Amino acid sequence: MPHNVRRASIARYLIALIFIAVATPAFASSGGGLPWEGPLQQIQESITGPVAGFIALAAVAVAGGMLIFGGELNDFARRLMYVVLVAGILLGATQIVGLFGASGASIALPGQADLSAAGEGSDG
């Protein structure tokens, strides 16, 4: 009986080792093969490029002009102009943030934190 138990445990260990050996390449993959990543990357490039900035500027200008100088707009037209205005602001958000000098997330490694931007210690 102990001989059969030993064989069963060796078989279990061998099967577990085979599963680990087969699963290791799957765990190590970069995950870049999802079918929706390409279209989403293209949409991201489209709404953050210079053409999107010009479209956002035009949308904000036209919607703002319509709301200011439009006179008597009915409720639907006013709401439509608000939607266009908000869409223009959202499209131009990356350019607006870029005006303040931020280009994206910046994560400092531990020990490399720069506290001078926080105003600490600059005046004494």
Image: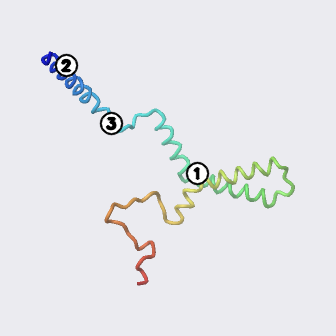
| Residue 55: image location, x then y, percent | 63, 52
What residue appears at the point 63 percent right and 55 percent down from the top-left corner? 89
Viewer-nearest residue: 101 or 49: 101
Cα–Cα span, label 1 and label 2: 65 Å
- Tell me the quarter of the picture where residue 121 sits: bottom left
Q: Is residue 119 left or right of residue 16?
A: right
| Residue 80: image location, x then y, percent | 75, 48
Q: Is residue 15 left or right of residue 26?
A: left
Viewer-nearest residue: 62 or 109: 109
Secondary structure category for the residue under label 2? helix
Secondary structure category for the residue under label 3? loop
When the figure is inspected, residue 99 is found, relative to residue 84, above or below; the finding is below
Q: What residue is disc 3 on?
A: 29
Residue 85's tag is none
Q: Is residue 74 left or right of residue 42?
A: right
Q: Amino acid at mark 2?
A: Ala
First reached walking from the N terminus: tag 1 or tag 2: 2
- Say if mark 1 contacts mark 2, CB within 8 Å: no
When the figure is inspected, residue 76 is found, relative to residue 106, above or below; the finding is above
Q: Residue furthest front?
A: 1
Residue 8's tag is 2
Q: Amino acid at mark 3?
A: Ser
Q: Residue furthest right?
A: 72
When the figure is inspected, residue 3 is found, relative to residue 21, above or below; the finding is above
Q: Is residue 64 left or right of residue 11?
A: right
Which quarter of the image is occupied by the N terminus?
A: top left
Q: What residue is disc 1 on?
A: 52
Q: Amino acid at mark 1?
A: Ala
